[in-house]
Amino acid sequence: MSREEEIRSELFDHTLNGHAPEVKALTEEGLKLGMNPMDILFKALIPSLEEVGRRFEKGDFFVPEMLIAARAMQGALVILRPLIAETGAKPIGKVVIGTVKGDIHDIGKNLVIIMMEGAGFDVVDLGVNVAPEKFVAAVQQHEPHIVGFSAFLTTTMPMFKVNIEALQKASLREKVHVMVGGAPVTEEYARQSGADTYSPDASIATRQAKAIVGAAQAAESSALEQAVDLIDKTLRKG
Amino acid sequence: METKVRSRSKEVVISVDRPFVVIGERINPTGRKVLAAEMKDGRMDRVRADAVAQVEAGAHMLDVNAGVPGIDEPALLVAAITAVSEVTDVPLCIDSSVIEALEAALAVYEGKALVNSTTAEDERLDRILPVVKKYGAAVIGMANDETGISMVPEERLQIAQRIIERARYYGIPKEDVVIDPIAMTVAADPQAGVITLQTMRIIKERLGNNMVCGASNVSFGLPDRPIVNAAFFPVAMDAGLSCAITNPLIPDVRKAVMASDLLLGHDEYAMRWIADFRAAQKKAVGAG
């Protein structure tokens, strides 16, 4: 096994176990050896976080393990992000997300953000107690593929519908895919509210988001491949 | 400071100088799909059974929540309270974030209820507190507002103070405001427990109000939750918690509360502890 292969495999394991210092050190070592930043991201870090998500869905992993794995990955992303930005590669999709007005619960929403960022999405977090007009303004400004509404209370769930109507009024509804989730939310309720997708947990939400942008991004992903190749070649030349 | 709540026939006194008050949390359709479906259809058998089981397991009060999505919550909350009152006589904690539901429930409730809850936003305070006053109830004040939940104990204390002052303005005495210092899961923030305990200490010291919290929150997202929940009680009770909304059907929780009462000097000559042991022994013999 080459050192590069070893690094990829160690990065996978250390991210899975949330060892931030090791993940950072391995990322730095890999870059020094001339490994492609996109390669480190897409062949080691993202698969590892996906595995974390799978285990969480199955109930084998618990919330703190997900958070610590994400934190370990964040340490590597801080190093990789500027390098990837230089190459002009785009994130796989853009998401605007927030907890609806009247509700300040954010654990679930934050898990979704962690998983989506881990999967390569550019996520705009509007925080908690987000008013409909704030969602509308953010969708207008950021033009995301997806907007996500989180609600933890039966009394704040009706805000899904209010938000969706606000998007309609601003003629934005057709331009954005609406995902909703939160403890009391059901598939049926989500549909009645006019949402496009109901997300039962953070890992599933991320998978759904990938499928949603998948259609829109199929063309772009081949561009991404080309970018990776280009970086590869450039690095080899250097 | 004593907070007194009443049913038609029973009074419960909440105070740090008395045995801990357990408020059974089970009558809540959030996250309980079967219960939610039954309540939606107006079937209250499970609500009644949950009420009886929790009181038998030592609950001094019961929380009643009817927050089923897409229903007439005032009507459903009234129906649930009526059902619970048919089978138990413990005072109730009326739980809704819909003000109309709180008002409808208070209107039919016989006694002095504990209202769960208000946060510190002006808009909430100015709507809920007059209703609490009108029906002579007590109220839980959660130490957060529209800006979210502060992770600074001093700030939570200030928010609690704001609720107490506004309650006084509406004619609700200090002892009828039970503060929720907010217990959050240690799964999301390792310091969450410490922050909650420190908040309790300074509220106890400087405000002296009774405190309640959703004690099962502390273990959300973790494995083996009952032990974590149980371990929370002695530290929280020592820090000033005088009642909690929790699940008395979990033996670890029930026993942790009783043992903490004993250790904190609220069980004279261990009579309650011993009686509970005897009852369990008798039950085991009876079963065998």
Image: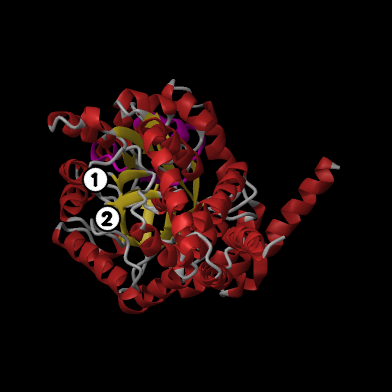
Picture mark count: 2
Residue occupying the far top of the picture = B41
Mark 2: few/some/many CA within 10 Å (<14, 14-19, 20+): many
Res. B66 image quadrant: top left
Q: Is residue B37 left or right of residue A161?
A: right
Give, as a three-letter code, the residue at label 2. Thr
The residue tagged 1 is A101
Label annotation for residue B28: none
Q: Find numbered disc 2 in the image and state the secondary structure of the residue it sits on.
A: loop
Q: Position of residue A155 (x, y in %)?
A: 30, 38
Pinpoint the chain carrying mark 2.
B
Q: Is residue B123 above or below residue B53?
A: below
Task: For the N terminus of chain B, give its image quadrant.
Answer: bottom left
Task: For the C terminus of chain B, give its image quadrant.
Answer: top right
Q: Is residue A216 above or below residue B184?
A: above
Per the model, the C-alpha gap separating discs 2 and 1 is 14 Å
Mark 1: few/some/many CA within 10 Å (<14, 14-19, 20+): many
Give, as a three-letter code, the residue at label 1. Lys
Q: Is residue A172 left or right of residue B271?
A: left
Q: Is any atom of residue B20 visible in this view?
A: no
Residue occupying the far bottom of the picture = B205
Q: Is residue A118 magenta?
A: no
Q: Position of residue B233 (x, y in %)?
A: 55, 65
Label annotation for residue B119: 2
Q: Is any atom of residue B92 visible in this view?
A: yes
The residue shown at (28%, 71%) is B155
Q: Is residue B216 left or right of residue B274?
A: left
Q: Nearer the viewer, residue B19 or B38?
A: B38
